[in-house]
Amino acid sequence: MGKKVCLVDFDLRAPSHQSLFTSSSFSITSAAKSFTGFLVGNHEPQMVINSTDRENFYCVFSDIEILQRKESKIRTKLTQHGEGRILAKLFEFVRYCNTQKFDFLIFDCMPGITYRSLDALVVSDKVMVVTRPVRSEISGLRLVISECYSKLEGAKLFSIMNQVEQQEDLAHIPNSLDVNLAKENVQGITKCLEESSVSIPLLYTFRRIPFVTERIYVLDEKNHPFTIEIEDFCSKIL
Amino acid sequence: MSEIQDRELKKILSQILDELKIISQNLISIDSFLATSSIVSAETTSSRTTVSNESRVDALTSMPSSLDILNLQESRPGIFKTYKAIQKIEDWVKSADIASLTFRTRGLESRYLNYLAQKGFVMKKREKIDSESRATEVWYKIVGANS
């Protein structure tokens, strides 16, 4: 029996997990309320956790009304709820999950640094920093490390680099300038992590794989190169 | 109805719709304000507790955000660990309980907890120990969204 895991779609502005899970060979066995509703005080924590057909795997979805309607009531309520109260609700959810004996509670945050991603950083014990070898990411990463990650006392930090061009892929790029730039960016991110004031080891480098659909490859394509990479990565972190 | 009248009517209706949207937004903000006020008044009417009502009202109305906590860690290195530890417990706790979680001394945790209480991150109360005439115990509690 595996670990008891709960995955929370904490990208409140653009929730995507609901569509991801419905387009894969995966089924939700109970329809729960939205996490956004919990954050604004409409629901209790036990009402927002969806059980699935996978043993010990639970997921929590954010409200997709934000995407569907321009004049979303929940969005207005969320913005008027107060930053401090949302953080308090998040801690309340973590405490509830502790009582339910979850081994892992994973918050999938929105890209970039916003109040919500800071909230997730504050409540977490481990932080996975996902980077991409892009020039803008290097300067941004340096700033985020000094302003946020360095203050997370007691939290374990590690990073992964996503969408890295492999040597065989670089061979197909016609312009040598682009090849050099791609290599420089990878080196830039690595150097930035190595020179940071806090330890953020680079655990894994994922190569760029062109995707055609929004399916979850680790569930649907057991022999896909990405699935093999994910399995290798999991064996390293667990 | 002529085309000009029709256009005028559409324009007026559109203005009414805009006004209604503004009214709706204002009502939501009033609703949210009233919800906060009811929490505060519920806190202040409690006469049994020994907690300073003033500090509790302050704590509820200006609940600190994640940015406030990270800034606090900058000015008081080490305080973030205390804050995280107390957030794990919903009930009133003593500094010794937090010390057992952080593996640091009770005195240090007491100092950090007092600072957190002073800044409105946690609530603080003092209770008399029945067996001893003058001794008191200090208790701390997180400020929850529905405190």
Image (cartoon, helix red, strand yellow):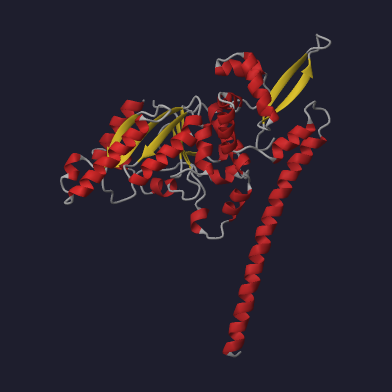
Is A208 situated left or right of B5 in this image?
left
Residue B95 in view of the camera: yes
Residue nearest the observer in this picture, B105 or A226: B105
Residue B48 position by quadrant: top right
Residue B126 position by quadrant: top right
Residue nearest the observer in this picture, B22 or B42: B22
A205 w.r.t. B8: above or below: above
A80 w.r.t. A104: above or below: below
Q: Residue at x 18, y 48 (%)?
A: A176
The x, y position of residue A48, in whole percent, is 54, 41
Query: Can you say which quadrant of the picture contains the N terminus of chain B?
Result: bottom right
Residue nearest the observer in this picture, A24 or B68: B68
- Total number of numbered labels? 0
Is A106 situated left or right of B102 in this image?
left
Residue A141 position by quadrant: top left
Is A204 situated left or right of B136 in this image?
left
B117 w.r.t. B98: above or below: below
